[in-house]
Amino acid sequence: MFQKEIEESLQLLEKKWPVDPILKDFMVGKRSDVTDYPIKVKDVVFHIPFLADEKKFILWKCFWPDCHNCCERQGRLPLTSDDLIVIGKGLKYQKTSDFVKNETLVATWNESSPSGQQVVMTAVNLKRKKDETEADDGTHISCRFLDDKGACSIHPGRPGVCYLYPFSAWLENDKGKARVHSTFQFTGDCPGFYLAESLDSMKDVLREYSEIIYDYNMKYARTEREGYSSSSFV
Ligand code: SF4
Ligand code: SF4
């Protein structure tokens, strides 16, 4: 995401939630004291940002149901092959092919990998509004499945990527074995980030998300093998 977009997202976020000025500076790239603190939790290596001058970690908790900002400002919803079946059935489609035809769009977009390399991604995306077109890809749309009580109307069958937010995940080769890594996405849309001197307050969350992230990565890798999505370095 570009710095300008993150700044705009933060300006909107600040109308509803307090945002720590230190975190704000970090998210728009104004801190030069950021180091990476890797911690392995079950089968996932989390990369937690540490601000050396503050001697504090950047941690996260979710404010749902008081917050559903990520559903109100959804950029795209790439689906795994498991999502295609589960969500298709949930929306009462007899055939997955009909669900794909009516409720999804194929989109291609560029992403930065954690090492800064550009990756071209192509995936089948769930339409966030009924009349969504390719031109809407990446724009912030309030998701059509967010109901008037602030809940997701297709939960628990919501896309795996919704369970993942605000983490991102990737695979790295670790002595011949695929190892799942994860870090936060700082899009400027989530009020749940906070500063803390130790990781203790987030240990349960890391344990919970380790399983979610590992499971999602396996499903996404299968989705690529089955030809529903692809990623390649530019
Ligand atoms: S992940 Fe962040 S934006 Fe989404 S509901 Fe939780 S606190 Fe809000
Ligand atoms: S599918 Fe559900 S969880 Fe995902 S963005 Fe839409 S409302 Fe939110």
Image (cartoon, rainbow, N blue to C red):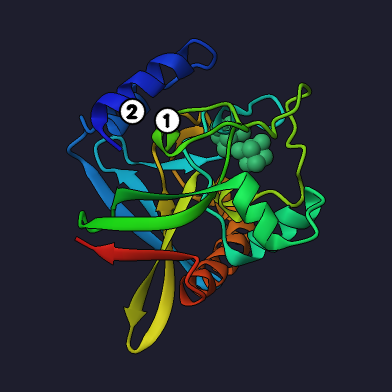
Residue at disc 2, secondary structure: helix
Q: Nearer the viewer, mark 1 or mark 2?
A: 1
Q: How many marks?
A: 2
Q: CA distance from mark 1 to mark 2?
A: 13 Å
Left or right, 132 with respect to 232, comes to right
Residue 130 is situated, as x and y percent measured from the top left of the image, at 63, 33
For label 1, the residue is 139
Q: Quadrant of the N terminus?
A: top left
Q: Callout 2: 10 Å neighbours few (<14), some, many (20+)?
A: some
Q: Residue at x 23, y 58 (%)?
A: 115
Q: Say which label, 1 or 2, has the lower sequence index.
A: 2
* Frontmost residue, 83 versus 40: 83
Residue 144 is situated, as x and y percent measured from the top left of the image, at 66, 31
Q: Residue furthest top?
A: 15
Residue 149 visible in rendering: yes
Residue at disc 1, secondary structure: loop
| Residue 6 image label | 2
Name which residue type carries label 2: Ile
Residue 24 is situated, as x and y percent measured from the top left of the image, at 34, 25
Residue 62 visible in rendering: no
Picture quadrant of ligand 1 = top right
Instruction: From this view, report whether residue 25 is shown above or below residue 124.
Output: above
Residue 123 is situated, as x and y percent measured from the top left of the image, at 45, 56
Q: Quadrant of the C terminus?
A: bottom left
Q: Quadrant of residue 10?
A: top left
Q: Residue at x 69, y 48 (%)?
A: 158
Q: Quadrant of residue 34?
A: top left
Left or right, 209 with respect to 138, comes to right
